[in-house]
Image (cartoon, rainbow, N blue to C red):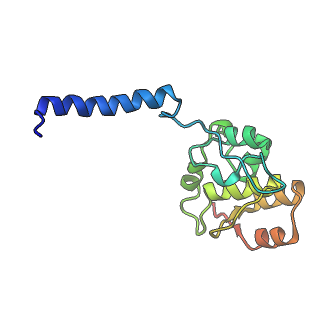
Amino acid sequence: MKIKSATLGILVLGIVFGGILMSSAMDLWITESTKIPDKIVVDGAEGAYDPEDIKGSYTFGEVSELFDIPLEDMAAAFDLPKEIDAAAFKNKELETIYADQELEVGTGSVRLFVSFYKGLPYELTEETYLLSNAVEILKEKANLTQEQIDYLDSHIATISK
């Protein structure tokens, strides 16, 4: 069976755009981020947003709103300069601010801070460090286990300014 190139071109375009139209009609075609993390399905925390799903593109304002953490605590925990708008500050920008430090402080640090602050389950798959400000806020405001306190005490990133 031979297919003319014009027929093949129309067929390919029909399949591609038809697939897009069908996906859109069934609300499966999503081209932008919804900025809503997945929900936890673990006993005791089901229905809460999963801190492990926090992305670098999330702003502190979005994290604060989604996880019900005061924006002031977020800004203080990560020692944001006063001139920076904490609500619009993106998690991934932490890596830029603390790029010249020995230990990495970034999106993983935000995930850890949020999970400990809210008492949500979090699997420590990599060495994650927090600033001393974040550790102090967690010790003051979160209900930490002794294991979490020990982890925090051994994972403080000291900042040289």
* Residue 91 x %, y %: 61, 48
Residue at x-position 61% and y-position 56%: 106
User: How many numbered discs sit on the rendered protein?
Assistant: 0
Q: Is residue 51 left or right of residue 24?
A: right
Task: Judge from the rendering whether residue 21 lies leftward or rightward of residue 47; answer left or right.
Answer: left
Report the quarter where the C terminus lies: bottom right
Q: At 47% across and 28% down in the image, what residue appears?
A: 24
Q: Nearer the viewer, residue 30 or 72?
A: 30
Residue positioned 81% across, 56% down in the render:
43
Answer with left or right where residue 92 lies relative to residue 50.
left
Report the front residue among 102 and 17: 17
Q: Position of residue 52 (x, y in %)?
A: 66, 55
Displayed quadrant of residue 89: top right
Q: Work out whether 112 lies above or below 61.
A: below
Q: Can you say which quadrant of the picture contains the N terminus?
A: top left
Occupied quadrant, residue 16: top left
